[in-house]
Amino acid sequence: MHVLYLNPFDGGSHRACAEGWRSASRHSLEIVGLPAYKWKWRMRHASVTMARAVSQREKPSRPDVIFCTDMLNLPEFLGLAPPRIAQLPTVIYFHENQLTYPIRPPHQRDLHYAYTNLISAISANRVLFNSNFHLREFTDAAEAWLNRMPDYQHLEIIDEIRQKAAVIPPGIRSLDVSKFSDDRDSPSDHSQLRILWVSRWEFDKAPETFFAALRLLKQNSVNFSLSVLGESYRSVPACFDEARRALADHIAHWGYLPSRADYDRVLCESDVVVSTAQHEFFGIGILEAVAAGCFPLVPRRLAYVETLPDEPRFFYDGTVGELTEKLAALANLRSQGKSLWPLDEARILTDAFRWESIARRLDDEITTVVRDGAAK
């Protein structure tokens, strides 16, 4: 089948998902993307820009289905697209949503973008979310929001969205760890606990909690090294610069790595990946690190409780104190020459999230949507 994939914010995890699916799909994916720049403007103009783009394609063959992300105003697009496109069945994939995505105070949420998400979900034949947590949070928040409206609340649409929704996580890359020197299974030559951060450098990832725990480790003379990856933007929390100075003698790597090979190498040379996030709809970075062999240590909340097994060793209560205690315990294992966990366990844990598996699930969804559309 021919899938017309509309990706208004074609960068970061959005691009990785599109390319990952295409690389493993049994269908043919035609990706129409726009640069990952100025997301608000992308959400406003993408319907016009993409409707014109698909009408002027060099190969105007008729696709079987439209697949788009939450950054597209789907009903606007369908109203502007040529009839041969507008009549196709549609699937929308929610990487995030603008109703519950965290905003930094004192900014106020622009609910026009949230309503774009809502009416796009209403108009699609199928609505996919990257986690059950995300599906529940969005629909519950939308229901509460509509309940506050003065009239014409249309609360029935929330149940309609729930009925046609499904959860399919994004895939992760299959990392060939054999390319890198890795000694987690025999750590006696490295008594230092190698700690990894892969999250964005933003307030919703609660980096101050992470760095506070590391300062306590340093005060207690715990032997550790630190690699801080992840993307940073114009507004970086002050705790990053403060931590870079305070932990200078522990830093192995600091900063974003655009090279996949370099990024993978740091993952493979780390022992434990830590999250302190207050917001996470899925967490691709954490799972990719786990696939590379890192032991996960994450707060018991958000999407983590469904992407990781329900085992106490992987979770902490979200506080600086317990995070520090658990990192110190892992450092103690490392100092004794013990492995934190078998690499085989890490690979088994992440097998279900590799693109080879996820692409089959997405392909099956597409087949069902097209079949159901043809039956009407």
Image: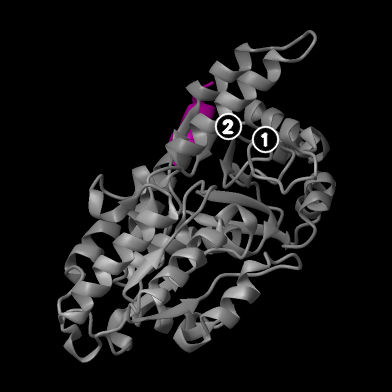
Q: Out of 169 and 209, give the one closest to the viewer.
A: 209
- In reply to whether residue 153 is colored magenta, the answer given is no
* Boundaries of the magenta span: 367-376
Residue 138, which numbered label? 2
Question: Which mark sits nearer the N-terminus, 1 or 2?
Answer: 1
- What amino acid type is highlighted by mark number 2? Phe
Image quarter of residue 322:
bottom left
Q: Residue at x 68, y 67 (%)?
A: 238
Whole-number angstrom distance, CA of label 1 to CA of label 2: 7 Å
Query: Taking 325 as reference, is 82 left or right?
Result: right
Relative height, residue 194 to residue 317 (above, below): below
Image point (15%, 80%), residue name: 336
Q: Amino acid at mark 1?
A: Leu
Q: Is residue 255 visible?
A: no
Q: Which residue is mark 1?
A: 99
The residue positioned farthest toward the front in the image shown? 219
Q: Tell whether position 373 is magenta.
A: yes
Residue under the image location 45 percent in, 41 percent down: 131
Q: Position of residue 363 (x, y in %)?
A: 43, 47
Q: Quadrant of residue 326?
A: bottom left
